[in-house]
Image: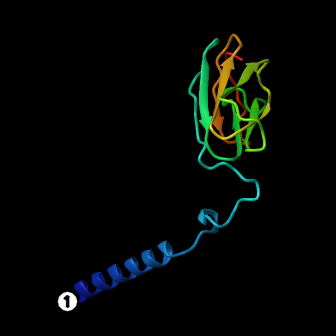
Amino acid sequence: MLISNQRSMLFTIVVSLFLIVTGCSDSSTDPDNESSNNQNQSANFSSGSIAPGETYSYTFQEEGTVDYYCTIHTPDMTGKITVTSNVEAVNRDTVSMENNQFVPENLEVAPNTEVVWVNNEDHNHDIQTGTPSSGDNGDDPNY
């Protein structure tokens, strides 16, 4: 009987702790708590390897700012897309990959714009949302 009571008590404590933890409020997930840098949380993409002459595209739906980079050529090859209704709407805009840079590095587009990245170099690139980690040196044998 003593072992059964201990198991029951342990179960009650675990369940209680679970309820307390899941009931906590995290301001980072609060929809009323707008981020100071206005990051576009819905834009999340990873192109995979883009060979010379190939393209990758992504359609940006919501306003905000999206940082991206080439994981092969970090930390130098970075870019930023700002999605805003304050610019003229077009169906498609282009970013070129040349000299191990995104050109233009910073691009403003209207919501619902497809951005096409074109690899104009003789080696592979890729595109990943976010910023390069400080520990990633981007060493690439094809660089």
Q: Residue at x 71, y 59 (%)?
A: 35
Find the residue positioned furthest to the left: 1
Q: Quadrant of residue 91?
A: top right
Please count the marks in the image.
1
Q: Quadrant of the C terminus?
A: top right
120 vs 102: above or below? above
Q: Residue at x 71, y 35 (%)?
A: 89
Side of 29 relative to 122 (left or right): left
Question: Residue beneath label 1, please?
Answer: 1
- Pick the front one: 133 or 127: 127
On the image, the x and y values in percent for residue 83 come to 71, 42
Q: Residue at x 63, y 63 (%)?
A: 28
Q: In the structure shown, which secondary structural element does the residue marked by tag 1 occupy?
A: loop
- Pick the front one: 109 or 143: 109
* Colouring method of the image: rainbow
Q: Residue at x 62, y 38 (%)?
A: 112
76 vs 141: above or below? below
Q: Quadrant of the N terminus?
A: bottom left
How crowded is the residue under tag 1: few (<14 C-alpha within 10 Å), some, or many (20+)? few
10 vs 1: above or below? above
Q: Amino acid at mark 1?
A: Met
On the image, the x and y values in percent for residue 109 come to 73, 36
On the image, the x and y values in percent for residue 125 come to 65, 22
- Pick the front one: 96 or 52: 96
Side of 107 relative to 24 (left or right): right
